[in-house]
Amino acid sequence: MAELLNLESILLPGVEAKRPLIIAGPCSAETEEQVLSTARDLATKGVKIFRAGIWKPRTKPGGFEGIGSEGLGWLKRVKEETGMYVATEVANERHVFEALKYGVDMLWIGARTTANPFAVQEIADALKGTDIPVLIKNPVNPDLELWIGAVERIYNAGIHRIGVIHRGFSSYDKKLYRNLPQWHIPIELRRRIPNLPILCDPSHIGGKRELVAPLSQQAMDLGFDGLIVESHCNPDCAWSDKDQQVTPDVLSYIINMLAIRETSQTTENLSELRKQIDELDDQLLELLAKRMRIAREIGQYKKEHNMPVMQTARYNDLLNRRISQAQSMSMDRDFMRAILQTIHEESVRQQVEILNK
């Protein structure tokens, strides 16, 4: 699979194979006037692929769930009047058949659908015999295997024009972002399937229009192939997700301000620095092994003196002190918390192993 997938495989005639590939348009197709107005404006900005949601899965009933098949006719007019290609989301077999009937050029599978293997397989079966590019958003939960499984289902149906969209992951802990980026997951996906085109959806990650620009730049810095951005002619009046949509003018400004760094440069000049990293990694492993040996000795002492493994007061004190110390060394608080918690979990596991012998 890896040798067949690449950025060129998902491109449409006349769309340049250069970073970033831009797909833009409103979250939802609302009215024919809104769709055509936004599309015309985006076309003047050089956007070649227009996106609009026709069917919208909503968290709760009662919200706007999309205009439905009527909007596919509006997308057809966009193609005829602007020459743009059009893309929309599909969530089941009927959506696929309807979109293909109206000549939609590109499909994407949403995060909620990706999380459901039955739904993905239904879409895959409906796509058999076609040659349409399909983009697959990450599942709502941070499950890389589920994401890869969706890619494999579509690929096994004979669709070899596949890309993925990173739109972040749902979390109860909503601070800055609507959906946590967790960049390490798409990075690992690229390691597993090196040539798979990866686009970023900064609109859904950020949830706020002011975050679209910095998230887009971060995606480019990480080597992503493109962006799928929600753009509306009048975002404040949008029927869905108004806070994360930008006007075509703002989108054009964001794209023009992006710093696109060359991904094919040689890294020979980094060899000395990488050698130092390797040496430090070796030292870290040796220190961690030594720490675990001491943890096992502590476990033996606790066993002999009938003491519980967990010492909550000491752990909380240790965690707070180490995090403060890390911050004074310019390290991120959440990063250090995650590291220390992982080390502590392994120490507890080893002590429990001693107690059970």
Image: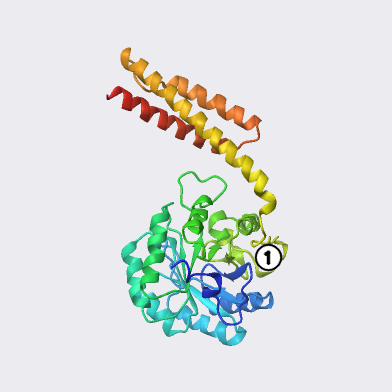
Asked whether 218 or 342 is in front, the reply is: 342
Looking at the image, can residue 213 be seen?
Answer: yes
In what element is the residue under mark 1?
A: helix
Is residue 259 found left or right of 162 in the rendered image? right
Identify the residue at image location x=48%, y=75%.
133
Q: Which residue is mark 1?
A: 255
Label 1 environment density (alpha carbons within 10 Å; few <14, some 14–19, many ≥20): some
Colour setup of the view? rainbow
- What is the residue that sits farthest to the top in this orientation? 305
Q: Based on the displayed image, in which of its 4 quarters is residue 297 positioned?
A: top left
Pinpoint residue 231: horizontal percent, then vertical percent: 60, 67
Identify the residue at image location x=57%, y=59%.
202
Asked whether 77 or 289 is in front, the reply is: 289
Q: How many marks?
A: 1
Is residue 153 found left or right of 199 in the rendered image? left
Name the amino acid, label 1.
Ile
Asked whether 184 or 69 is in front, the reply is: 184
Q: Based on the displayed image, in which of its 4 quarters is residue 112 positioned?
A: bottom left
Pinpoint residue 166: horizontal percent, then vertical percent: 51, 59
